[in-house]
Image (cartoon, coloured by chain):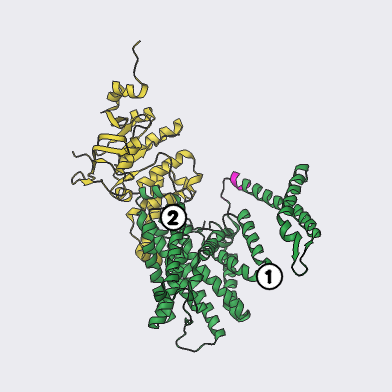
Chain colours: A green, B yellow
Amino acid sequence: MFSFSEIKKSLLISLWFMFLTFPIMVIRVNTIYKTIEWRWDRMIMVGVGSFFLSFLWRFFIGKKETGKKKTDTGEVQQLTWIQRLTENKKIYLPSLVAISVFVVLFPFVFSMYQTNIMTTALIYVVVGLGLNIVVGLAGLLDLGYVAFYAVGAYTYALLNQHFGLGFWTVLPLGAAMGFMFGVILGFPVLRLRGDYLAIVTLGFGEIIRLILENWNAFSSGPSGIANIPRPGLFGLHLSLHQNIIYMYFIMIGLAIFTIFIVGRLQDSRLGRAWIALREDEVACQAMGIDKTRTKLSAFALGATWAGMGGVMFAAKTTFINPASFTIWESIIILCVVVIGGMGSVLGVICGAMVLILLPEYLRAFSEYRMLLFGAILVIMMVFRPEGIISNVRKTYKFEGLKDNNKDNS
Amino acid sequence: MEPILEVKELTKDFGGLRALDRIDLKVHRGQIVALIGPNGAGKTTFFNCITGIYQPTKGEMLISPGGKEKKSLNGLKPNHVTKSGLARTFQNIRLFQNMTVLENVMIGRHCRMHAGIPGAVFRNPATMREEKQVVEDSYRLLEKIGLEQYVNEYAKNLPYGAQRRLEIARAMATEPFMLLLDEPAAGMNVKETKELDDLIVQICHQEKISILLIEHDMKLVMSLSDLIYVVDYGKKIAEGTPEEIKNNPDVIKAYLGEEVDA
């Protein structure tokens, strides 16, 4: 491990880091006295730090590689720890109970601020699970997903502004609008795949945003729509605090509903067709699967959840404008799916929690927040490229002709 | 008796290149028909035209599974061709790698199932019955093909010969009246080829599925086929029984080149 070449490598790395960080770490311009301070001591710190960290980095990379080799040579497919966890009823049930208790007590134990960001994270869970259908299951890379999110949000805002419709009326309408737009935008892009599809969907996402930004008469442009009411509860008057708790529980309900429906869709004739489509499009079609319908259904069903998430987003923030629906938002949702683990429901939930909650809790590190966030993402992708929880897809298992139920693999 | 597949003057141009030139072909019920020819002769193009992956430039393709009314395949999409009873395998294996063997076969059953989105969400009795039935049917099929020991394995982990057989199983799951096999023995060893030979005969005789196959393994072709078509440079140069083809001077010329007079 501590051979000469290793030390040389680390030395090179530390030199490189010293060079890279030189302008920001060493030079400091004192604007009052108009002088330059040279903080050479910092350079030494960077050098020593990166020297030792590079050893640590290589140690973990090496560990990961030997681990991979072991699973490659072993004939039997190793279960991941999470699969073993869900297999074992003794651990699974109590942990489920513990999580439910935690979820119910959360808004009463923690502050309003905490509840609020948890609600945001839950919106991303719902939207992420929707995108998971499109990207994770059907394998269609959609970079304009936020368009459907915007459709949902503006459906609520506009219907409320013009017709005074309430949250509960618009929630299914928002879902329906999402579905409809999914079909409309889905049709022209169905012939494309891979990179081309990504670029075209990116374009569609921007088109929707630009329409909202420039069509003043329709969407009041960049100034957005304000005073969107929060969800109502049988006409009761709720204080802000109560309302935040109420929205939290709505989101919990919606998230459970989403998990339930997406789980069932994934585990059906249609879900199998989606996965087959991801695996091999030509073979899929040759096996009698209607490519157009399957792709369109994935696109539209994915968009449905974005529509619902959008309605909830509008109700939560009470103000929307096109700036909330930029490409950055699409990327975040895509990150939720990819980092969580493509195609796995549990993975997407974890991904949303990590990606949305982490920047909030990193606020303690103030200006280093985004730096740390970026570093965590890079480390995650190096060590777990398949996502936090990967491939816990239910596979069909055959267990004799008499009782052939599906089971977790 | 009417042929179950009749191809009339099938022509396919790729730009200026005529890949298929007025090919006629007939397959009757219960026959095993082979399509042979040197590399690049247009055999796979022919398959792709029949199965709807390519649209032919000219020509007609008719099927009559019941032996009565004829149905044209022209302009049908691949999934509709499969639905009307023609299933195919691929020259380079195209399994769904990250799905289990059982799931691969279940995908083949897809076009004979009916459950839609509401069925998936509500899991009504009809859907559940269908799902149960498909698992059972798929397993029975795997038993027939002799892959039942791999039922819960991922397709990518199967040995090569088994992958080829799984492709045939998947195609058979679509309930075809005719199978189109594109080089099923490619890359197989002698033992595996022998097993494949038996399997094809079994499919043809027990399951009453007619077979059209492309193959380079002459021993296999000669022992299996009732009828052989030979194509070269997109043209049909011969048709006949294995005996006739063996002695046909045009075929020998296409495969071995022309004899040069000294």
Percent across and percent down for residue B192 are: 44, 34
Residue A181 visible somewhere in the drawing: yes
Q: Dot 1 surroundings within 10 Å: few (below 14), some, or many (20 or more)?
A: few
Marking on residue B79:
none
- Residue A131 placement, left or right of B202: right
Camera-side residue of B50 and A229: A229
The amino acid sitting under disc 2 is: Leu
Magenta highlight on residue B92: no
Marking on residue A366:
1
Labels 2 and 1 in the same subunit: yes
Disc 2 + disc 1, Cβ < 8 Å: no
Q: Which residue is mark 2?
A: A197
Camera-side residue of B195 and A215: A215
Percent across and percent down for residue B123 are: 39, 66
Q: Residue shown at 57%/48% (left/top)?
A: A76
Q: For numbered disc 2, what is the local secondary structure? A: helix
Determine which quarter of the picture holds residue A106. bottom right
Check the residue under mark 2 and report the chain it is in: A
Q: For numbered disc 1, what is the local secondary structure? A: helix
**Badge 2 or badge 1: first in the primary sequence:** 2
Determine which quarter of the picture holds residue A40. bottom right
Q: Dot 2 surroundings within 10 Å: few (below 14), some, or many (20 or more)?
A: some
Percent across and percent down for residue B218 are: 37, 28
The amino acid sitting under disc 1 is: Ser
Spatial distance from mark 2 to mark 1, Cα to Cα? 38 Å
State the extent of the magenta-drawn residues as a range: A70-77
Give the vertical position of B151 relative to B36 (above or below).
below
